[in-house]
């Protein structure tokens, strides 16, 4: 085979390998880390039915070979998440999905404090060169219109300020639906988690592909 043709063949093969699902542009495994609370920890569910495992299945169905790494701790506020960001989010993460704030809401934390904590988490990830995306949630109107308005704005504003992808209201359509919730009426059951994963997967896939 002539040297020029051999060279073109090798370069083409290398390009195909680098672009293959499951490999980053540097040939590293694709890893999504989910930094969150009980929703990402899978409270009340077997690991196989929890959001990280179900999201990985949905990403696989979309043609991506991705490892979804759970970094959720039940009960964590944004302050708790900030305190453990450096050791919970490993350096090999391709993207870190941040979903924190539900426990801030339950504890009535000032939205300004929640915003500062999220900004600090995103700044830590940026300093470590770990790309991030954020999923938000909405406060129930019963908590008070003023608080709900300020709280709801925290997530899109933080994502916009950091210049990262944003997925609005992850729990929409599931939270409060008894057929999709566990006995506490807050945490999604297995069926609810599957709905969350299916809705979230395309946005996560887009964020991951942008990093390859």
Image (spheres, rainbow, N blue to C red):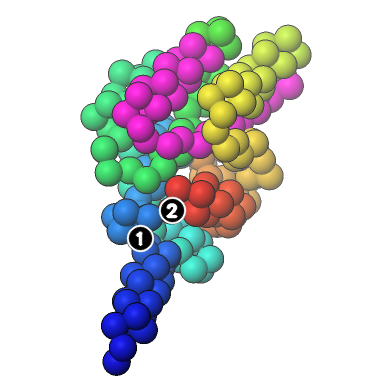
Alpha-carbon span between mark 2 and mark 1: 7 Å
The answer to which of 77 and 68 lies nearer the viewer is: 68
Q: Eyeballing the image, is 43 above or below 25? A: above
Position of residue 101 measured from the top left corner of the image (x, y, whole percent): 51, 24
Residue identified by numbered label 1: 23
Horizontal relation, residue 30 to residue 179: left or right: left
The answer to which of 204 and 24 lies nearer the viewer is: 24
Position of residue 180 measured from the top left corner of the image (x, y, whole percent): 60, 50
SS state under label 1: loop
Q: Examine the image and state in which quarter residue 5 appears.
A: bottom left
Position of residue 181 measured from the top left corner of the image (x, y, whole percent): 56, 45
Position of residue 107 measured from the top left corner of the image (x, y, whole percent): 50, 14
Residue in the image at 39% along x and 68% along y: 15
Tag 2 near tag 1, CB within 8 Å: yes
Q: Quick one: label 1, few (<14), some, or many (20+) residues within 10 Å?
A: some
Residue in the image at 41% along x and 42% along y: 95
The answer to which of 134 and 55 lies nearer the viewer is: 134
- Chain part drawn in magenta: 114-141
Residue 126 within the segment the image draws in magenta: yes
Q: Eyeballing the image, is 1 above or below 91? A: below
SS state under label 2: loop
Q: Quick one: label 2, few (<14), some, or many (20+) residues within 10 Å?
A: some
Q: Examine the image and state in which quarter residue 89 appears.
A: top left
Residue identified by numbered label 2: 212
Find the residue positioned furthest to the left: 87
Residue in the image at 27% along x and 26% along y: 86
Q: Examine the image and state in which quarter residue 33 appears.
A: top left
Residue in the image at 53% along x and 14% along y: 115
Residue 77 visible within the image: no
């Amino acid at each position: 085979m002539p040297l020029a043709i051999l060279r073109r063949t090798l370069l083409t093969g290398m390009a195909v390998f680098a672009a293959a699902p499951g490999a980053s542009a540097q040939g590293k495994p694709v890893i999504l880390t989910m930094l969150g609370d009980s929703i990402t920890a899978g409270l009340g569910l077997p690991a196989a039915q929890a959001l990280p495992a179900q999201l990985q299945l949905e990403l696989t169905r979309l043609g991506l070979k991705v490892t979804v790494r759970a970094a959720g701790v039940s009960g964590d506020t944004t302050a708790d998440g900030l305190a453990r960001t450096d050791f919970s989010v490993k350096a090999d993460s391709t993207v870190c999905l941040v979903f924190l704030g539900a426990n801030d809401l339950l504890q009535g934390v000032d939205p300004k404090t929640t915003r500062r904590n999220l900004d600090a988490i995103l700044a830590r990830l940026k300093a470590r060169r770990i790309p991030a995306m954020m999923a938000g949630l909405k406060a129930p109107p019963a908590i008070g219109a003023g608080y709900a308005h300020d709280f709801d704005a925290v997530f899109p504003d933080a994502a916009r300020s950091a210049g990262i992808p944003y997925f609005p209201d992850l729990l929409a359509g599931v939270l409060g639906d008894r057929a999709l919730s566990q006995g506490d009426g807050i945490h999604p059951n297995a069926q609810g988690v599957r709905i969350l994963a299916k809705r979230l997967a395309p946005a996560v896939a887009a964020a991951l592909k942008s990093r390859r």
